[in-house]
């Protein structure tokens, strides 16, 4: 697995919908993961890929579908794509512009996979590779989901009846009838160097790409902080919760913070102090703020604020009144 990858929470929606449509209630699974289903629809929310892989694996086992990646891709709607990504794909003018948008804005979906192109002898390969470990139970589901998501998007450009001549996956598997049936030549190759969707294309028909690919989510620290920023106000939030979401040990996260000359506790306290400043400005009492931010008592809140701001809550409020 690449270092602590994240993906859009909404990518779990097709798998949850597939569970629903097959008479399986996803609520117990989400409760075990301590994830609020309503949060998953937040357009800008990113989750550790580990969490989404657990949802995918559970959906496959519960429904008995080892080809769930294919089926889930059929449930993909605008919600599963980042709004900006969806906009650029929908407004692309021709195949070249579509491919340009696909490669340039893939980062908006997260860091859970990488996408690139290779061209040889009249064939463009849209290549992809999951950031999950190959031993992860959801690895092949992730590969198949990404492949059929790409195919679904390509059909908007090449026509609803278009099919790739064959498909290639880097995982090992027995042929799956539903997947084989989606190819023109009824061929699927497994154990290739990477997974890809082939498109027959004359290179002379391609125009130069206009955009420069972005590298959002490129830093492990940024990804961890993004998750902390999302969930830190949850009850009983702590480093154990973040480690649980990423599927790593608490020590791994502690080492990561140390490498950046910080600590999990310091960053969490920083979030609390930033929030407390907003609440104090809104007129909440010191005691109310301390309770809201889960400090054991107001004195602990005062000490924490003094450490980070060099001011107690009372001094901070006084400075606000003097500056107004």
Image: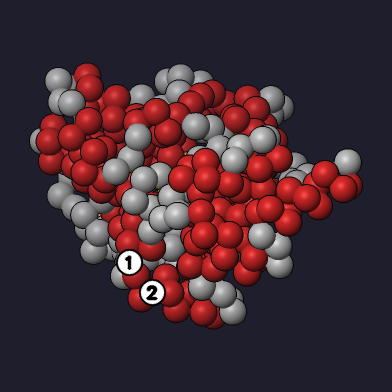
Q: Is residue 18 above or below residue 122?
A: above
Residue 240 in view of the camera: yes
> Dividing the picture into quarters, in which one does residue 56 lie?
top left
- In the image: residue 209, left or right of residue 182: right
- In the image: residue 202, left or right of residue 63: right
Tell me the number on the disc at residue 252: 2
Question: Which residue lies at the image location 29% right of the left edge and 54% below the top edge?
Answer: 139
Mark 2 is surrounded, within 10 Å at the Cα level, by few (under 14), some (14 to 19) or many (20 or more) other residues, namely few
In the rendered image, the quadrant that contains the N terminus is bottom left
Q: Is residue 299 above or below residue 156?
A: below
Question: Which residue lies at the image location 43% right of the left edge and 63% below the top edge?
Answer: 4
The residue lying furthest to the right in this view is 323
Residue designated by label 1? 248
Which of these two is toward me, 237 or 131? 237
> Dividing the picture into quarters, in which one does residue 84 lie?
top right
Question: Which residue lies at the image location 48% right of the left edge and 42% below the top edge?
Answer: 292
Which of these two is toward me, 53 or 176? 53
Which of these two is toward me, 24 or 113? 24
Residue 208 in view of the camera: no
In the rendered image, the quadrant that contains the C terminus is top right
Instruction: Check disc 2 and report its element: helix, strand or loop.
Output: helix
Q: CA distance from mark 1 to mark 2?
A: 7 Å
Residue 265 % position (x, y): 48, 67
Name the image colouring: secondary structure
Residue 64 % position (x, y): 10, 35
Q: Is residue 170 above or below residue 43?
A: below
Q: Label 2 near label 1: C-beta < 8 Å? A: yes
Which of these two is toward me, 46 or 277? 277
- In the image: residue 228, left or right of residue 204: left
Question: Which residue lies at the image location 34% right of the left edge and 56% below the top edge?
Answer: 241
- In the image: residue 289, left or right of residue 281: left
Instruction: Check disc 1 and report its element: helix, strand or loop.
Output: loop
């Amino acid at each position: 697995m690449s270092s602590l990858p994240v993906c859009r929470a909404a990518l779990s929606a097709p798998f949850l919908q597939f569970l629903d449509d097959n008479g399986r209630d996803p609520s117990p699974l989400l409760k075990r993961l301590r994830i609020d289903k309503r949060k998953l629809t937040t357009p800008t929310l990113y989750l550790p890929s580990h969490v989404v892989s657990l949802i995918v694996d559970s959906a496959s086992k519960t429904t008995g579908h080892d080809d769930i990646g294919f089926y889930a891709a059929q449930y993909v709607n605008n919600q599963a794509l980042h709004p900006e990504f969806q906009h650029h794909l929908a407004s692309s003018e021709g195949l070249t512009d579509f491919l340009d948008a696909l490669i340039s804005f893939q980062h908006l979906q997260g860091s859970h996979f990488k996408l690139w192109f290779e061209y040889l002898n009249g064939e463009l390969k849209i290549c992809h590779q999951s950031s999950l470990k190959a031993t992860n139970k959801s690895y092949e589901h992730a590969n198949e989901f990404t492949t059929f998501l790409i195919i679904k998007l390509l059909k908007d450009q090449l026509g609803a009846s278009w099919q790739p001549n064959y498909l290639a996956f880097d995982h090992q598997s027995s042929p799956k009838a539903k997947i084989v049936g989606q190819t023109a030549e009824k061929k699927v190759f497994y154990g290739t160097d990477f997974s890809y969707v082939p498109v027959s294309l004359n290179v002379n028909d391609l125009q130069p790409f206009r955009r420069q690919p972005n590298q959002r989510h490129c830093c492990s620290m940024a990804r961890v902080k993004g998750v902390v920023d999302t969930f830190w106000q949850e009850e009983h939030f702590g480093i154990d919760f973040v480690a649980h979401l990423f599927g790593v040990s608490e020590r791994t996260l502690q080492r990561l913070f140390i490498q950046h000359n910080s600590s999990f506790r310091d960053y969490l306290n920083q979030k609390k102090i930033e929030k407390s400043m907003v609440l104090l400005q809104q007129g909440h009492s010191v005691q109310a703020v301390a309770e809201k931010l889960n400090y054991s008592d107001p004195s602990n809140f005062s000490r924490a604020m003094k450490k980070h701001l060099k001011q107690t809550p009372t001094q901070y409020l006084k400075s606000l009144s003097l500056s107004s």
